[in-house]
Image (tube, coloured by chain):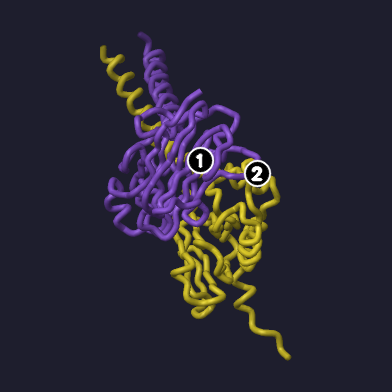
């Protein structure tokens, strides 16, 4: 083979590899994944919003949670599935229940479709420790559904997409970051579908 | 055979370079894209945004917190340090001012429980800039010339209009000005 063709082959392989590597990085960073530690379907990862973040984690956070605060200020959990490992769907109704709050100053549960709030006439995108109606024992029950429900109803809207729940713990007790598996977060039970 | 081996090594090197380069660039690109969006909607460097409640129709930031009233500013330290000043709200469930470098790393955060003095003054500068002693209660040193300032005022319930109105009014009591506005000698009487 001529030297020019050999050089072109190597340069082509280099450029092809670069395009593939760059493309993979872009796709990978934009995929919302439930990785890390946490109870049930809830997951959190260490290092969010910190200068110690790795290259990949910083890119992922920039695309799906930019300007997140470090764990000393907020610990973020996310859930994309119910307790049985099924993806959240607007065709179904879910019950989120907890009998106590996590050890944190203030918390909120927010529902996202494709990483943005679910548009709805009630202007209701979340419930927080300060807004959720409580059960007699101090716990709470939130219903996720595309159909109107009584009580703490979090609308799933009229458009399909990838649904994610985010549970934010503001000014958390350090035990949450140290042992996320033990954090008392709500169970996510699928009630009905169709 | 030798050519195939060389091409394979080149492809692996290329893949690694592409992977590293794009992951490195993403935070800067995402930040710059959001800055462009904010500018198109009227944002100006070193000026706090208006105090409004966002809805699903107006929110532009991914995984935004629906329970916060936010104010923000694109920070450009080219012309010297800035002074952020705020009366910290008393009706917020949580309040903080945070600063993010161009690559999205948090380099400063202070919340309402950290702050003991009203009004609270924060100097924002780069490593090569100086702020006279006594001008501010705290200093934030930005690793980059461009940064992003974000105020988070957390609402008790976004659907409770009375409490939201109170918090909106409290969150408005913040400003961002150049250091020169504070360092000038008082006018002669």
Give x and y (percent) for residue A140.
Answer: 44, 48
**What residue is at 64 percent from the left and 64 percent from the top?**
B166
Residues tagged 1 and 2 counted as in contact (Cβ below 8 A): no
Tell me which corner region of the image, top left, top right, bottom left or bottom right, holds residue A186: top left
- Per the rendering, the colour in which chain B appears is yellow
**What residue is at 60 percent from the left and 47 percent from the top?**
B35
**Between A95 and B112, which is closer to the camera in this rendering?**
A95
Q: Is residue B5 left or right of residue B72?
A: left
- Regarding residue A176, the answer to whether it shows in the image is yes
Which residue position holds label 1? A111
**Looking at the figure, which quarter contains the C terminus of chain B?**
bottom right
Give x and y (percent) for residue B99.
Answer: 50, 58
Label 2 resides on the chain identified as B
Which residue position holds label 2? B58
**What residue is at 61 percent from the left and 61 percent from the top?**
B163
- Per the rendering, the colour in which chain A appears is purple
Q: Residue furthest front?
A: A136
**Between B68 and A144, which is closer to the camera in this rendering?**
A144
Q: Is residue B42 left or right of residue A59?
A: right
């Amino acid at each position: 083979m001529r030297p020019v063709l050999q050089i072109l082959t190597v340069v082509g392989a280099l450029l092809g590899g670069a395009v593939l590597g760059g493309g993979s990085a872009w796709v990978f960073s934009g995929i919302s994944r439930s990785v890390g530690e946490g109870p049930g379907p809830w997951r959190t990862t260490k290092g969010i919003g910190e200068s110690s973040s790795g290259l990949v984690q910083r890119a992922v956070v920039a695309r799906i949670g930019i300007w997140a605060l470090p764990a000393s200020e907020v610990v973020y959990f996310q859930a994309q599935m119910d307790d049985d490992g099924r993806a959240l769907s607007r065709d179904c109704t879910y019950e989120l229940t907890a009998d106590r709050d996590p050890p944190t100053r203030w918390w909120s549960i927010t529902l996202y479709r494709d990483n943005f709030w679910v548009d709805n006439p009630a202007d209701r995108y979340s419930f927080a420790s300060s807004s959720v109606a409580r059960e007699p024992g101090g716990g709470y029950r939130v219903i996720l559904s595309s159909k109107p429900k009584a009580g703490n109803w979090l609308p799933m809207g009229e458009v399909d997409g990838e649904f994610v729940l985010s549970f934010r713990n503001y000014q958390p007790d350090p035990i949450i970051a140290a042992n996320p598996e033990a954090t008392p977060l709500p169970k996510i039970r699928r009630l009905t579908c169709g | 055979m030798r050519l195939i081996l060389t091409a394979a090594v080149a492809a692996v090197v290329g893949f690694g370079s592409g992977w590293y380069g794009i992951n490195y660039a993403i935070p800067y690109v995402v930040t710059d894209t959001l800055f462009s969006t904010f500018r198109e909607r009227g944002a100006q460097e070193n000026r706090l945004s208006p105090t409004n409640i966002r809805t699903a129709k107006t929110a532009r930031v991914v995984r935004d917190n629906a329970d916060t009233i936010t104010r923000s500013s694109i920070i450009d330290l080219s012309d010297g340090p800035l002074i952020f000043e705020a009366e910290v709200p008393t009706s917020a469930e949580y309040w903080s001012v945070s600063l993010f470098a161009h690559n999205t790393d948090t380099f400063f955060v202070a919340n309402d429980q950290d702050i003991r003095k009203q009004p609270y003054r924060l100097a924002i500068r780069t490593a090569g800039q100086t702020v006279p002693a006594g001008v501010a209660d705290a200093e934030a040193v930005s690793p980059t010339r461009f940064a992003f300032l974000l105020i988070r005022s957390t609402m008790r319930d976004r659907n409770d209009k009375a409490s939201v109105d109170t918090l909106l009014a409290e969150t408005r009591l913040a400003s961002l000005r150049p250091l020169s506005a504070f360092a000038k000698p008082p006018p002669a009487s």
